[in-house]
Image (spheres, rainbow, N blue to C red):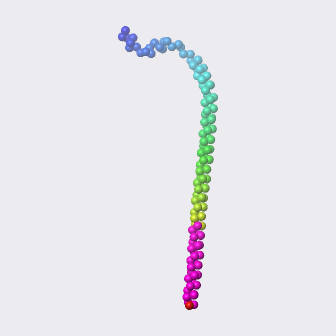
Amino acid sequence: GVGSRDASPDEGVVEDMPMVDEKAVEQLTEGLISHYLPDLQRSKSALKELTQNQVVLLETLEQEISKFKECNSILDINALFSEAKHYHNKLVNIRNEMMMLHEKTSKLKVSRVNL
């Protein structure tokens, strides 16, 4: 009747379940753990090794980057020196030209005086 419809669907299921054997549950749990634990421990040590390798790799990478930066700054300095050398050569050439012009003008003055 009306009362049976109000009963929860789970009611009566508990009585249908067989008695759970605690010892069996414990043995099954131990069995599962002993089956999966070695794999998990191997995975753990592999991950630990991987992490350590990653740290070493990062440190090496940082060292390489600093070396690269150092090389770049040396290249910049070299470029600066070659530019300075270039301008120095230009100045030397200009000075030589001015000295030549000075000689020519003094010769002209001398020849004019002699006229």
Q: How many marks?
A: 0
Q: Nearer the viewer, residue 27 or 69?
A: 69
Q: Residue furthest left?
A: 2
Please provide percent x and percent y for residue 44: 61, 33
Q: Residue at x 53, y 14 (%)?
A: 19
Q: Nearer the viewer, residue 52 or 30?
A: 52
Q: Residue at x 62, y 35 (%)?
A: 46
Q: Residue at x 54, y 16 (%)?
A: 20
Please provide percent x and percent y for residue 39: 62, 29
Query: Measured along the vertical axis of the image, is residue 107 above or below residue 82?
Result: below
Query: Measured along the vertical axis of the image, is residue 19 above or below residue 49?
Result: above
Quarter of the figure that contains the C terminus: bottom right
Q: Main secondary structure of the magenta part?
A: helix
Q: Residue at x 49, y 12 (%)?
A: 16
Q: Nearer the viewer, residue 61 or 115?
A: 115
Please provide percent x and percent y for residue 75: 60, 58
Give residue 55's quadrant in the image: top right
Quarter of the figure that contains the N terminus: top left
Q: Give yes or no for residue 51 being in the magenta stretch.
A: no
User: Where does the magenta region start and end?
Assistant: 86-114
Q: Give yes or no for residue 93 being in the magenta stretch.
A: yes
Q: Residue furthest front?
A: 115
Give residue 5's quadrant in the image: top left
Query: Measured along the vertical axis of the image, is residue 74 above or below residue 93?
Result: above
Give residue 29's quadrant in the image: top right
Q: Residue furthest top?
A: 1
Left or right: 24 in relation to 15: right
Q: Nearer the viewer, residue 69 or 11?
A: 69
